[in-house]
Amino acid sequence: MKLIFLDIDGTLTEAGENTPPDSALRAIEKARQQGNKVFLCSGRNIGMAKPVLDYGFDGIIALAGAYVIAEKEVIYDQPMDPADFDDLLKILHEDGVFCTAETKDRTYGDENLSDFLSTADSDNSEIERWRKALQSQLGIQPMKNYDGSPAYKIVIMCNRASQLARARELYEKDYDFVIQEVKEHGNCINGELIHRSFDKGKAIRLVAAHYGVDIADTVGFGDSMNDLTMIETVGTSLCMGNGAQALKDISDFILPSVKEDGLAKGFELLGLI
């Protein structure tokens, strides 16, 4: 049995979309019929991932590893420390950083985030995901509506790296500032703050241990820098043709893009179907 982990945006679907290509759905179904288990492995929370999760998967690594479900059983659940969350949000806002705060089921965004994204370069799948999510009102509520529910991570967007300097100085010891690959002269820095106690790679090891599967028998498909720990951890790693160059450089295989049925071709390449 292989454990197969799929990023969503830019890997399983086009960025910001919720409908995988038919070729991908057929490949996933065939792989599961052969006794393999297929998991989503995403930065999305459960609320934003649900439209894709409903297609039928064996579980999900959500919120970049903070919340993990294996066949309806929650095997990991690690929200941020509330004091850290409050202080980080305060510092980031003071320094002009646009933020979204993610709970298990809901996303809260700064009210003027859509204005900022309308001028941002769309050179990575995460920026495009947020732009489309805001346009479709995919469960994103104004930050003023945040009700104090446990938050798991903060997504950050800004114009200059210097805007993150104070937050980094105070919190980088405990939080990984995962910054997406951007064009050399891009006008948007996009990333997320993830507590160092978890990540996609550590979550994959938890799932493998849960099933008693050797890490050598795990497979990961990704495209952006928040997939880095997944690609570094799995036994076999595959990066989409539309993915970040830094990820391609360390992946075992580079596939065609998501628009060119890359996922299905990867399943075929590995003999999973």
Image (cartoon, rainbow, N blue to C red):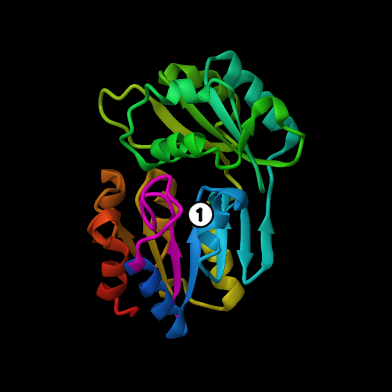
Label 1 sits on residue = 200
Badge count:
1
Which residue is located at x 60 percent, y 41 percent? 139
Which residue is located at x 75 percent, y 40 percent? 149
Task: Pick whichever, 6 or 229, lies toward us.
Answer: 6
Task: Pick whichever, 56 or 7, lies toward us.
Answer: 56
Relative to residue 188, is residue 147 depicted above or below? below
Q: Position of residue 109 (x, y in %)?
A: 59, 30
Which residue is located at x 55 percent, y 42 percent? 138
Residue 76, quarter of the rendered image? bottom right
Q: Position of residue 22 (x, y in %)?
A: 35, 67
Task: Pick whichever, 8 or 133, lies toward us.
Answer: 133
Q: Position of residue 7 (x, y in %)?
A: 43, 56
Relative to residue 103, is residue 220 depicted above or below? below
Q: Is residue 115 magenta?
A: no
Relative to residue 182, is residue 198 depicted above or below? below
Q: Which residues are magenta?
A: 1-22
- Using the rendered image of the protein, determine whether residue 249 is visible from the camera's viewpoint: no
Q: Position of residue 85 (x, y in %)?
A: 68, 32
Instruction: From the viewer's perspective, tell me whether residue 11 is left or right of residue 107.
Output: left
Which residue is located at x 58 percent, y 65 percent? 206
- Using the rendered image of the protein, determine whether residue 72 is visible from the camera's viewpoint: yes
Q: Amino acid at mark 1?
A: Lys
Quadrant of the snapshot with the C terminus: bottom left
Q: Report the residue that reaches farthest toward the bottom.
A: 34
Q: Report the residue that reaches farthest toward the right.
A: 148
| SS at badge 1 | helix
Q: Magenta region's main secondary structure?
A: loop
Please rate how many residues cluster around mark 1, counting C-alpha atoms within 10 Å: few if below 14, some from 14 to 19, many from 20.
many
Q: Is residue 10 magenta?
A: yes
